[in-house]
Image: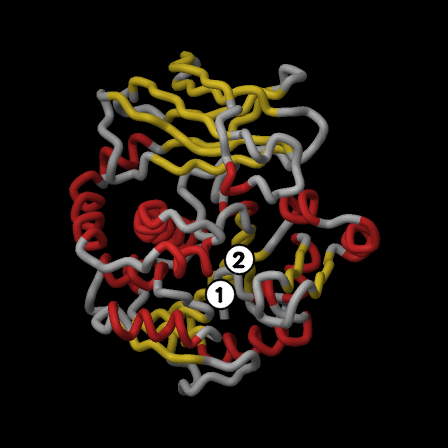
Amino acid sequence: MTETAVFLLDGPGYAEIRPGGRAVFRGIALAAGDDPVVEVVASSAGRTLGRAPANGPSPEISWVPLAASAACRFTLDVSVPQGAVVDLSVRHASGAETTAFRYDVPFAEREAERLRMLAARIEAMPVPASDLVAVTQGGGDVEVYRRSILESFLAMELQLRAAGADPAGVRSVLDIGCGTGRLLAGWHADDPGRRLVGTDLNPDLIAWARTHLPAVAAWEVNGLHPPLPHPDGTVDLVVLSSVLTHVSLANQRAWLAEVRRLLAPGGRALVTLHGTVYASVFLRGADAARWADTGYAEVAGAAEGANAYTSFHSESFARALFAEFSSAVFFPRGAADGAPRRFPVASLQDVYVLAR
């Protein structure tokens, strides 16, 4: 996926795919630059499976300041081969074509029984109403939210393994900025014996989680600044998904110091940030110049901690920010090996897995 392509796949999820049968791939595809996306092409082992225009109505992202953002949806009905990856590519008006997603059919085949089990457990969990979903996800589609519980967990598993950690060895997870518990629900479905804690600045989101997901995790309200009321060195995995993206640089440093305090020896932190794709789409004028000069920009469009308070990090700036950790493994736009094979944890945000 290039820096000028904005591509998000809505489905089918990995628990839904049936190799050897048909599947409807759907999502959005548009350009951040001057070369419009005209269609999405599905192929496997060098054979074209199908193609579809990327011009369907997409009112949910029409606010994004890109040409065609109001009409960039695609729907692609294809026969899914057995034992082979399906490449989903975007073709631009110029004829340039880049692979945007590699749908890992062999993974779905190997893990079919486990995926069905996880999907059934998640299906049995309550999910928030549309208005609460919109608070944390930007859109109010409840079924997309539910599907993302499993898909985000699978992405985190892959990223942790790629960073040298064993997800099965994670016995405790702290999700800072947990919202309504979307990410913790996946960890719980995988192993209800894990010790999970979710904390968030928004008391309404925590109230929902306490009422509807009391068996999933302990739910806490945190302040804008650390510390949290937990002992040193007691957490195997700390998740900060779309958290440092909404606080000041000084506060980012404070929260990272808190994460180092909380992580057990050998523990990991999984952090998402607005990277190059977000900067190219949303930064203009002095903010874009600051990004170009330093690799970092901060836009205070609202009070700190709100969605409209946004920060943007280049890889080099982020690595300097994470210098106190022993390692930082970078997954641009969440991809562990080139084009992503898993659905994202947090839209098109970059992912870093940090080791204590």
Q: Is residue 188 left or right of residue 58?
A: left
Residue 317, image x and y in percent?
A: 70, 59
Name the residue that disc number 1 marks.
240
Residue 188: image quadrant is bottom left
Q: Quadrant of residue 257?
A: bottom right
From what the image shows, is residue 225 above or below residue 120? Answer: below
143 vs 228, nearest the viewer: 143
Horizontal side of 291 relative to 254 (left or right) equals right
Q: Secondary structure at mark 1?
A: strand
Query: Which amino acid, mark 1?
Result: Leu
Q: Which mark is residue 258?
A: none
Horizontal and vertical percent position of residue 78: 33, 19
Asked if disc 1 and disc 2 are in contact, CB closer than 8 Å, the reply is yes
Residue found at x 61% / y 43%: 64
Residue at 30 percent of width and 77 percent of height: 218
- Quarter of the picture containing the N terminus is top right
- Residue 272 is marked as 2
- On the question of residue 157 being in view, the answer is no
Please name whichever residue, 105 or 27, is drawn nearer the observer in this view of the structure: 27
Q: Position of residue 285 (x, y in %)?
A: 82, 50
- Which of the two labelled residues, at mark 1 and mark 2, occupies the earlier sequence position? 1
84 or 89: nearer the viewer:
89
Residue pushed farthest top? 47
